[in-house]
Image: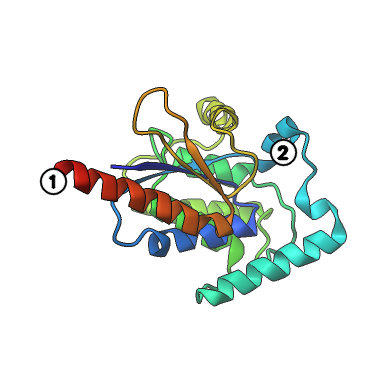
Amino acid sequence: MPVIHFYFDFVSPYAYVAFHALPRTLFGLPYQMVYRPLVLGALLKAHGTPVPVSLPPKREWLFRHAGWLAREQGLEFALPASHPFSSIPWLRMALAASPQGQPGRHVCETLFDAIWQGGRDADDPALREAVWQELVRDLPAVRDPADSEVKQELFAIGEAAIAHGVFGVPTCVLLPEEEGGTPEVFWGVEGLPMLREAVLARATTAEGTDA
């Protein structure tokens, strides 16, 4: 079964849109999704790339475009009260919600929606605590988001992303089927149709082999 790593940062409106678009994009296909939160700022710094929202006209376009994409799929979209905000506490919450540091879709959806729906202040500790308590009620085992192990996991995911050739978010990485193979990188919302084509090709090949 194809394995896909979805690299994202909650600070990205495009990551929010892509996250919600993934199930429809891959509908009817076999796949395993692994959600990989990372710090976009650290990734961009590693590549020597400026933060996209640092240029005012580009910032205005990004938010307008992301909002349009969200409405196209019937998805609620509201800018947080302040942006950019510190996404690191949210990223650590995602990892801490799983003993293995592999957040499920429910966890990611809860955090994404808390940030990108309602226009609330993502830097507000009270909001983060309220969302965290909501997650704790639904999960069998969680860790402390401030734990050093969680912080190290977040750093390690960033290193893995660079090794996979990730240069921005959202990015889907289709892992190779054979050891030593090259992962396929699909960047942005616009890369999702290409991802579907690649997964479909693998499924078709597998069917032909079985026959």
At 66% from the left and 42% from the top, the residue drawn is 40
Q: Name the residue under label 2.
A: 44
| Quadrant holding the N terminus | top left
Q: Which of marks 1 and 2 precedes in the sequence? A: 2
Which residue position is annotated with label 1?
211
> Residue 34, which numbered label?
none
Q: Distance between the residues labelled 2 and 1?
A: 45 Å
Given residues 182 and 136, the one toward you in this image is: 182
Label total for image:
2
Amino acid type at mark 2: Leu
Q: Which of 28 and 150 is in front in this view?
A: 28
Q: Is residue 84 left or right of residue 122?
A: right
Identify which residue is drawn at 64% across, 47% down.
87
Q: x and y percent of residue 7 in the render? A: 53, 43
Give whichever of 176, 43 is nearer the camera. Answer: 176
**Quick check: marks 2 and 1 in contact, CB under 8 Å?**
no
- Element type at mark 1: loop
SS class of the residue under badge 2? helix
Asked if residue 100 is positioned above or below residue 58 in the image, the reply reads: above
Nearer the viewer's eye, disc 2 or disc 1? 1
Residue 203: horizontal and vertical position, in percent? 28, 49
Q: Which amino acid does label 1 sit on?
A: Ala
Say whether residue 139 is visible. Answer: no
Q: Crowdedness of circle 1 by 10 Å Cα count: few (<14), some, many (20+)? A: few
Where does residue 2 sit, x and y in percent of width and height? Answer: 33, 42
Q: Position of residue 71 (x, y in %)?
A: 57, 76
Relative horizontal placement of residue 95, taking residue 188 as reference (left or right)? left
Is residue 20 at all visible to an observer of this figure?
yes
In the displayed image of the protein, which residue is found farthest to the left?
211
